[in-house]
Image (spheres, rainbow, N blue to C red):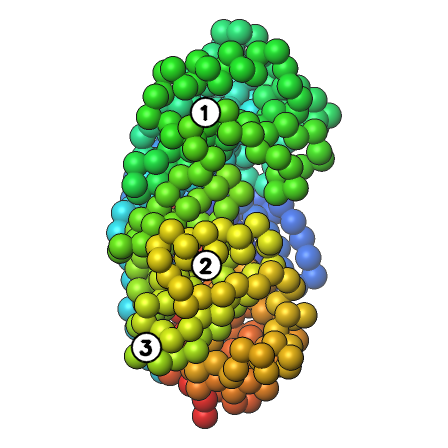
């Protein structure tokens, strides 16, 4: 098992990356892509199944683009994720490492996500079994993308990722749309009425639904009224009108049709307000474990100045604020910074401040002179990792400790190699936030040499 959940096999010294298999499978392969140094392939026939395999629990496994590791037992998944972190840090980072601490498992293996995004399609994907059956099948669907296909959506009957009433809401909206002959999304021509559905389920019991449409069809309000009446537990019912070339709506108005324009997540005695555009870790209980580990690595005593880089909605900043003297958060997205201030306010946290802007521009000598040299830096960048200018600024600041939280150990390893000039890696612990996928978070403690 190697990067991105693929397996590796060698044939006459040629490397072949294979999807949809497990280590130990004996298969016939069909080459799907050829490069000078490697090939990519998919299995066409299994001669022998690996002893590592288990029976997938989802009827959509193999067709849906998510949960691609359901055919592996959870202990096996954790083993490969731990090895993935080790390999990345050693082969890319090439820095001296302590022994990796055992990966922290997810508190739940099913129904662990608090947010799912579904897509409408007027021309849903048919499986080979459906095609061979030769039956008339409804092609208007509401579900997930098939792997590597932006324009192909499978109709999801039951998703094991999000707790109820997520499945019931999705199915009720789809059935209502079919019964009333509402126009479904054409992903190629970008025409239709119904485009996208987002459901957020908070650990407080709050429930948000966001319906994204191309335009204000006369059926919009009757549909929303139907949803509210059938699911009175929805605390935030919203819609977005979006005729852009993509489904992002950070630059568009989100209209709260019924209820409050936000929901709340709970972590210890803190409540975090989550709006339609807010980022919040999609595994709430897993995020709590991740943040506890981050706080532990930071070794706060109450006297420290903390910089929280890529702070998002200030979740980590507010989570550690009561153990620190002062926390300064920096984030690129302005709306997230507004959320961060609100989260401080509703929790009575008074020792935080937040700034919006590009990290490499904000974190300059003048900024550091104004706020002071930090005792601890917590950084949780996006998958691309930190910009080289940000790494250079960290080397100039020489904070005694850096806690680096990453959702991509490969880019984290690259940054660790640059930081090796002044910092030693003293603790490493992977955290599983996404069971049945190859994705893994990793927390690293760096201390000034």
In the picture, the quarter occupied by the N terminus is: bottom left
- Where residue 427 appears, as percent x and y from the top left, is 36, 78
Frontmost of labels 2 and 3 is 3
Q: Residue furthest top?
A: 180
Callout 2 secondary element? loop
Q: CA distance from mark 3 to mark 1?
A: 42 Å
Query: Circle 3 sits on which residue?
Result: 302
Q: CA distance from mark 2 to mark 3?
A: 18 Å
Residue displayed at 47% across by 35% down = 261
Number of the label disc, if any, that sits on residue 314: 2
Viewer-proximal residue among 357 and 282: 357
Query: Circle 1 sits on which residue?
Result: 258
Residue displayed at 36% across by 16% down = 230
**Alpha-carbon neighbours of circle 2 within 10 Å: few (<14), some, or many (≥20)?**
many
Q: Is residue 22 visible?
A: no
- Where residue 346 appears, as percent x and y from the top left, is 38, 51
Which numbered disc, 2 or 3, marks the residue that appears first in the sequence? Answer: 3
- Where residue 309 appears, as percent x and y from the top left, is 52, 68
Q: CA distance from mark 1 to mark 2?
A: 27 Å
Label pair 3/1, CB-CB below 8 angstroms: no
Viewer-proximal residue among 42 and 243: 243
Viewer-proximal residue among 199 and 325: 325
Viewer-proximal residue among 318 and 179: 318
Give the image quarter of residue 75: bottom left
């Amino acid at each position: 098992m190697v990067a991105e959940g693929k397996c590796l096999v060698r044939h006459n010294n040629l490397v072949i990356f294979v999807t949809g298999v497990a280590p130990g499978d004996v298969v016939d392969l069909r080459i799907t892509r050829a490069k000078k140094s490697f090939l990519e392939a998919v299995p066409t026939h299994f001669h022998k199944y690996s002893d590592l395999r288990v029976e997938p629990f989802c009827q959509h496994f193999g067709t849906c683009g998510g949960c691609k590791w359901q055919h592996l037992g959870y202990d096996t998944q954790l083993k490969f994720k731990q090895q993935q972190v080790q390999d990345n840090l050693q082969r890319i980072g090439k820095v001296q490492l302590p022994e990796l601490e055992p990966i922290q498992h997810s508190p739940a293996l099913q129904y662990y996500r608090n947010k799912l995004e579904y897509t409408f399609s007027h021309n849903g994907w048919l499986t080979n079994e459906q095609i061979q059956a030769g039956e008339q099948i409804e092609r208007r669907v509401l579900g997930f993308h098939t792997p590597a296909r932006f324009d192909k959506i499978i109709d999801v009957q039951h998703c094991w990722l999000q707790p109820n009433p997520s499945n019931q809401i999705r199915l009720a909206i789809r059935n209502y749309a079919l019964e009333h002959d509402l126009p479904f999304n054409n992903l190629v021509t970008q025409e239709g009425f119904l485009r996208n559905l987002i459901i957020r389920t908070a650990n407080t019991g709050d429930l948000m639904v966001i319906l994204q449409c191309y335009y204000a069809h006369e059926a919009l309000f009757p549909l929303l009224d139907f949803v509210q009446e059938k699911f009175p537990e929805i605390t935030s019912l919203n819609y977005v009108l979006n005729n852009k070339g993509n489904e992002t709506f950070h630059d568009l108005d989100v209209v709260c049709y019924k209820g409050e324009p936000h929901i709340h997540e709970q972590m210890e005695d803190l409540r975090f307000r989550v709006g339609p555009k807010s980022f919040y870790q999609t595994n709430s209980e897993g995020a709590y474990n991740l943040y506890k580990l981050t706080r532990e690595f930071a070794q706060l005593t109450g006297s420290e100045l903390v910089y929280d880089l890529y702070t998002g909605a200030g979740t980590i900043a507010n989570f550690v604020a009561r153990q620190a003297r002062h926390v300064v958060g920096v984030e690129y997205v302005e709306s997230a910074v507004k959320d961060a201030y609100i989260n401080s306010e509703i929790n009575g946290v008074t020792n935080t401040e937040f700034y919006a802007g590009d990290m490499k521009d904000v974190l300059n000598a003048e900024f550091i002179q104004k706020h002071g040299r930090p005792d601890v830096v917590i950084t949780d960048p996006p998958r691309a990792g930190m910009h080289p200018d940000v790494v250079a600024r960290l080397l100039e600041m020489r904070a005694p400790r850096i806690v680096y939280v990453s959702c991509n150990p490969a880019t984290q390893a690259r940054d660790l190699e640059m930081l090796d000039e002044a910092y030693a890696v003293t603790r490493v612990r992977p955290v599983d936030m996404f069971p049945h996928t190859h994705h893994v978070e990793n927390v690293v403690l760096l201390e000034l040499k």
